[in-house]
Image (cartoon, helix red, strand yellow):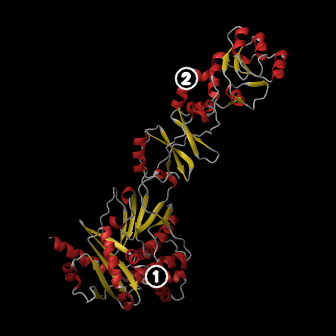
Amino acid sequence: MSNKEKPVWIIGHRNPDTDSVCSAIAYAYLKRQLGMNARPARAGKLNEETRYVLGRFGFEEPRLINYFYPTLEDIDLYDAPTVTPAETLRNVGRLFVENPHLKSVPVVDGGDAVVGIITVGDLAKRYYQDDSIRELENGETTFADIIRTLEGTLVTGDAAGLFHGKIKIGASRAATLADDVAPGDLVILGDREDVQRELLETGRICLVLTRNTPVSAAVKAAAEAGGSLIITTPYNTYTTARMINQSISVRLLMSRNVVCFNTTDLLQDVRQKIVSAKYVSYPVLRKGRYKGVIDRGMMLEPQRQQVILVDHNERSQAVEGIEETRILEIIDHHRLGGLTTGTPIYIRQEPVGSTATIVANMFQSLNVEIPPEYAGILFAAVVSDTLCFRSPTTTPADQAAAGRLARIAGLADPEALAMAVLRAGSVLNRMSPAALIRNDFKEFDFGDFRVTVSQINIMDRTQAREKMPALQKALDAFRAKEGYGMCLLMLTDVLGESTDLMESGNRDSLLDRIFGKRQPGGFYFLPGVLSRKKQIIPPLTEAIKQENN
C-alpha cells in the first residue's frame, strides 16, 4: 500500500469502551462523506457491552491497532525487477544497464518467494575470472540459453540439452585443434570449413560460427551424422567468447543466504539489522511474497501515519507510538492531558457526558444525514457513558442528542435498549477478577506517580461485595506487576446510583481526606458517585497536588 492510499485512522483510547469505539466508527463515516479516506480502529479488546452494541446494529469490530510505530509498510519501497533462477546472466546484465540505480536483483520462484539475490558485484567477479569463460561444466547452461545469449541461430542439432563441456577458440591449425577437442566441447570458429569438417569427426560437439558464417551442406550433413550442433551468431570471436559466459543461469551465481524483511517489521529494528548485516540491498516481503527492495542508501524516513483521536487526549491513554504519527484532530469530552503536536490541529472538546454526543452534533452542524444504524450505535454510546443519564456528567446536550438519535434509529423503546446495554456491560459474573480489573481502566500520570482507575458497572451490590476479597487480591497483583503507584476500582451500582471504591497502594491518608472513612470491608462507600471522570479524578488530582506542595 503506498502512502497516498493509506487511510486516516480514527481511534479511541486503550481498553476501549462503547463510547470510544462507536464514536470512532460514526466519525469515520462522517469524514468519509466529507471526502476523507477515514477508517475506524480500536486500541484494544472490546468489552461485552460494546460487542453487544455492534452486534445489535450490524457492525463488524473495527481494526485492532496495537501500535503506531512506523514499519516498512510506511516506506515507499524500490520496485526492483526480479528474475527466476533459470534466467541467464545476460538478461540480468540488461536489467542493471536499464536501471542504473539498481544494485541487486532478487531471485524469486514461481510463487514470488525470494530464493536468492544477485548483485552487480557478482557479475563483475564472474567476468574477471578468465577460467569461467572457458569452462561451464558447473554452469547448468542449456544450448537454448547459449543461442539466446548469442542472438544466434540453430542450424542443426538438438538445443534442449545441457552444455557440460569446455569452450575452445578455433585459432589453431585443424590438426592441433582437433587433438585438443573432446566430445561435448564447444568450439568458437570462423569460416574455415576445413577445420569445421575435421572437428565434426571428433563426435558430438557444438560449433559456434561467428559473423553469421554460412554453413555448407557438407558440413551440415557431417554434424547431423555425428549428433553435433551448429550455431551461427552475428558477433565476432572475442565478443562471442565473452557473451557465452553470460549464458549461465542465475542459479549458479546467486547468493542463497538472503536477509529479507517483512512489511510489518519496525523501522527501528530494520535500521539496526542493516547496520549489522552490511549487505547492498534487502528484499521486503508481505506474507512471504516479494513486494520490493530497500538498500543501505535509502533514507528510511516514513510519511507519518495520520490519525484522529476520539474520547481521549492523554498520552498514557493513547495507543503506543502515537508520538510517531501526525495527529489531525481530537474529539473529546475529558480534561486536557499531556499530548503535544508539531503543528496546529483541530480540537473539539466539550464538557458533555459522551463523545458520541459531540459526534452526533457534528453530523447535524455539517448537514450530513446519519444512517439509522449509525444513529443506533451513537445512542447506545451516549447511554453507556452517561449511565442512562444518571451520571453527573450528563448534560441537556446529551439528553437532546440521545432523543434525536433514538428517533433516527427508529427505536420503539429507547429505555429498553438502554437497560439492555447496561446489562451487557455488567460483566461481574462473566469474567475473572484479574480480567475485571483490566476490562475498563484508565491511566493517569501525576508526574512520577501513576494511577489507574478501573470501573465495573453492577446490578447487584450484595453479589459484588461477596467478590471483593478476590477483586482486592487481583487489584494488588495488577499494581505490583505493572508498577503503578496506586490502583483504584469502582464498583458502580447504576440503578442504586452509588459506588463502592476499592484501592491498592496504601495511600490511606490521601484517600481518607478525599472520600472519608472506610467501611469495615476496607472500601469506601460513595453514594451519588457514578463518574470516574467527574467525581473521582478531579478530587484525586487536587489532593495529590496539595500533597506534593
* Figure check: 159 above or below 509: above
In the rendered image, residue 213, in percent from the top left (x then y), is placed at: 75, 16
In the rendered image, residue 95, in percent from the top left (x then y), is placed at: 58, 33
Quadrant hosting residue 330: bottom left
Question: In this rendering, would 199 be left or right of 429?
Answer: right
Q: Earlier in the sequence, mark 1 or mark 2?
A: 2
Q: Residue at x 19, y 82 (%)?
A: 513
Q: Which residue is drawn at 68% across and 19% down?
A: 235
The kind of residue tagged 1 is Arg
Which residue occupies the foreground of this view, 227 or 5?
Answer: 227
The image quadrant where one finds the C terminus is bottom left
Secondary structure of residue under mark 1: loop
Asked if one can make out residue 80 in the rendered structure from this viewpoint, the answer is yes
Crowding at label 2, few (<14), some or many (≥20) Cα neighbours within 10 Å? few
- Pointer 2: what residue? 129
Q: Which residue lies furthest to the left in this view?
A: 549
Question: In this rendering, would 368 be left or right of 209?
Answer: left
- Pointer 1: what residue? 430
Crowding at label 1, few (<14), some or many (≥20) Cα neighbours within 10 Å? few
The kind of residue tagged 2 is Gln
Quadrant hosting residue 17: bottom left
Q: Which residue is drawn at 47% across and 80% down?
A: 380
In the rendered image, residue 519, in percent from the top left (x then y), is placed at: 26, 89
Question: In this rendering, would 245 be left or right of 335?
Answer: right
In the rendered image, residue 476, in percent from the top left (x then y), is placed at: 30, 75
Secondary structure of residue under mark 2: loop
Question: In this rendering, would 443 be left or right of 15?
Answer: left
